[in-house]
Image (spheres, grey):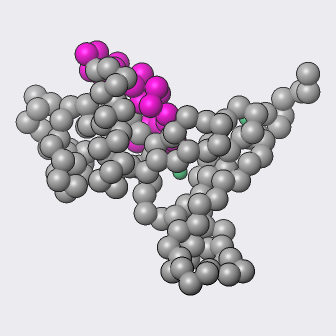
């Protein structure tokens, strides 16, 4: 039954020229419910549906999805790579320096790259990669120990 139905995930994979395999479909579904998940979290979600999946296979799936632009990889300093489906809008991330929670930040002002450098050295700019660091509400509310 799941092998014949159509789904947004299948269409997405086909539009990117990828075969719609079950691990790829389930990885996309995992990222829909767990934005900014790392490979281990994706693996935990996928293996609950596909028990034969290995973490190594998930790394392969994530790399194929990232290479074709379906998934964006973000790599905050000191954190494993995280993956998300929100691609192409040059949004930024805010990371809790205590627990590692990640939130999305829309462009600060106007259009991408939304940070105007004092000099571009002749480069044509397309993207600004910014990570904001701070404390998430939970950590900010936690009593100091
Ligand atoms: Zn936190
Ligand atoms: Zn994001």
Residue 97: x, y in percent?
75, 39
Residue closest to the eye, 25 or 113: 113
Considering every residue shown, the one lying at the far front of the view is 121
Relative to 54, does residue 3 appear above or below in the rendering?
below
- Residue 129 position, x and y percent, is 59, 60
* Farthest residue, direction top: 51
Query: Which residue appears at 56% of the width and 45% of the height?
Result: 75
- Image quadrant in which the N terminus is located: top left
Answer yes or no: is residue 92 visible. Answer: yes
In magenta stretch: residue 1: no
Q: Is residue 92 above or below residue 128?
A: above
Classify 108 as above or below 44.
Answer: below
Q: How many labels does the image show?
A: 0
Indicate left or right for 123 with 101 as reference.
left
Spot occupied by residue 54 in the image (x, y as percentages of width and height): 32, 20
User: Residue 59 occupies which quadrant of the picture?
Assistant: top left
Q: Nearer the viewer, residue 14 or 118?
A: 118
The image shows residue 11 at horizontal and vertical percentages of 19, 51
64 or 108: which is nearer to us? 64
Q: Is residue 134 left or right of residue 126?
A: right
**Bounds of the magenta segment:** 32-52
Whether residue 109 is visible here, answered yes or no, is: no
Which residue occupies the extreme right position in the image?
144
Give the residue drawn at x 17%, y 41%. 20
Residue at left offset 91%, top offset 21%: 145
Q: Does the magenta stretch include residue 38?
A: yes
Q: Residue furthest bottom?
A: 122
Q: Who is closer to the viewer here, 93 or 2?
A: 93
């Amino acid at each position: 039954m799941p092998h014949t139905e159509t789904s947004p995930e299948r269409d997405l994979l086909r539009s990117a020229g990828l075969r719609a395999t079950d691990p790829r479909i389930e990885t996309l579904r995992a990222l829909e419910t767990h934005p900014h998940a790392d490979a281990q979290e994706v693996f935990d979600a996928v293996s609950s549906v596909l028990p034969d999946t290995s973490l190594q296979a998930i790394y392969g799936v994530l790399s194929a999805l990232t290479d074709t632009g379906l998934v964006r990889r973000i790599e905050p300093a000191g954190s494993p790579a995280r993956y998300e489906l929100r691609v192409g809008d040059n949004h930024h991330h805010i990371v809790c320096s205590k627990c590692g929670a990640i939130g999305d930040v829309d462009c600060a002002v106007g259009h991408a790259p939304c940070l105007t450098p004092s000099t571009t050295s002749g480069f044509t700019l397309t993207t600004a990669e910014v990570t904001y660091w701070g404390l998430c509400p939970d950590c900010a509310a936690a009593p100091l120990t």
